[in-house]
Every structure is written in structure tokens, then in C-alpha cells.
Amino acid sequence: LAKTTQPISMDSYEGQEVNITCSHNNIATNDYITWYQQFPSQGPRFIIQGYKTKVTNEVASLFIPADRKSSTLSLPRVSLSDTAVYYCLVGDDGNKLVFGAGTILRVKS
Amino acid sequence: NAGVTQTPKFQVLKTGQSMTLQCAQDMNHEYMSWYRQDPGMGLRLIHYSVGAGITDQGEVPNGYNVSRSTTEDFPLRLLSAAPSQTSVYFCASTSGANVLTFGAGSRLTVL
């Protein structure tokens, strides 16, 4: 299973764009990259998933370079309610995903 | 669609007691899994199942049993509770490639 490395924490202000980068140097050919968001006392929630290049949905964008050894989650114009822990997961088997410690994002007013 | 439902939400046990955390999903997903999350930590995989009648161990399976008699249900049993099992437990079911839907969690305290 590919190991991922993320920053432990990040601070931002309301209205700013936030980019969280995840390193996954030993990603396998069949692996997808998936990001989850977790609020206190709740289970993680799916944000976005990609395999290569760029993926965008109503919540975020995911940028994946050609070598796929890293990925960047981009949150446009964050608000206080985006304060959460963000997890980057890499794998091709949804049953054996390994969660790291994630990135604590704190959005300030 | 209720998604993934976990019961109970809170439970206090004494050391040595046994109990079962219930998990049910109504999305007809084949894959289900159990995670535990300790304070300030990420989630660790306990057990998982790829379908009815099939289960396997994750990272931290010791002290827990699972069974999968139906597609909908995936209970987690604590055989003899220990203080080290104090944690928040999350059940998840998986659709497509790696997209997990989590339950709200069960907070367990072992005294």
C-alpha cells in the first residue's frame, strides 16, 4: 500500500484559496487518489477522487502531476466551516485503505 | 436512504466485559470495514469484508471479531474489553473505487 505524507497542519483566513499537498512516491499503476474531510465527532466524508491530471467538483479541485507521485487538494475561498482534518488516501482496494494522521486545516476570520 | 447506521453511539464497559457494535448499510455495497480512531490520530483499520461470508484482518485486529452473514450487516465484537480499546469506532461501506461512506461513529470507553 502506498504511504502518504501530508503537512500536519495549515492555517488560513476566510476567503483564501488553500492548497494541501500529499506525497505518495510509491503509488502503484492501479491506485486512485482520494481525499476525505473529517469534522470533530463525525466520520470522514468523501471530497474528491482522481487518477491523473485535474479533477474538479463543486467542493474542490484535485491536481495530479504526470508522475503521480504527489497530489494537491485545492479548496477555493475557504470559510470557517472548512476547518477540519483532511486525509489523502492512495490505493486500488477500498477495503484496505490506510489513513495517515491527515492535515489539520484551521480557517480564521 | 439512511446510508451507514451504527449503534450504539456511546457505550461504557468495564474491563473484561464483551459487547457488539452494530453496523448496517442500505446501499447494497459489498465492501464494508471497521476503523478505530484514537484522540488526535488517524483511522486504523480493524477488520474488513468483501462480501457476505468473507472477512479479513486489517492493521489492528487483535481483541476484535467480525462476521458478515448478510450484505447489510457487519457487527464488530469486543471479546474481553480492555482500557486500550477505548476509542471511537467507525464503520464504513465502499462503493466504486475507494469511495467510503462512514457511519456517525460509536464512542466506547472501557474502565
Image (cartoon, coloured by chain):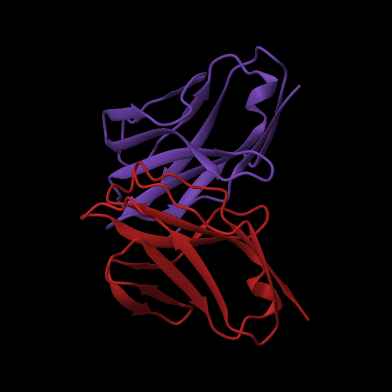
Chain colours: A red, B purple
- When asked about the image quadrant of residue A78, the answer is bottom right
Residue visible at 21% across and 54% down in the picture: A30
Q: Can see residue B72? A: no
Residue visible at 39% across and 38% down in the picture: B73
What residue occupies the far left of the structure in this picture?
A29
Q: Nearer the viewer, residue A73 or B88?
A: A73
Side of A107 relative to B95 (left or right): right
Q: How many marks?
A: 0
Vertical arrangement, residue B101 with respect to residue A54, above or below: above
Quarter of the picture containing the N terminus of chain A is: top left
Q: Can see residue B97? A: yes
Quarter of the picture containing the C terminus of chain A is: bottom right
Residue visible at 69% across and 42% down in the picture: B39
Side of B102 relative to B18 (left or right): left
Q: Residue A70, percent across and down?
A: 39, 63
Q: Nearer the viewer, residue B72 or A20?
A: A20
Q: Residue A97, percent across and down?
A: 39, 45
Side of B10 relative to A44 (left or right): right
Residue visible at 40% across and 31% down in the picture: B58
- When asked about the image quadrant of residue B100, the answer is bottom left
Side of A36 relative to B110 (left or right): left
Q: Nearer the viewer, residue B106 or A25?
A: A25
Q: Residue B77, percent across and down?
A: 50, 24
Q: Nearer the viewer, residue A74 or B20?
A: A74
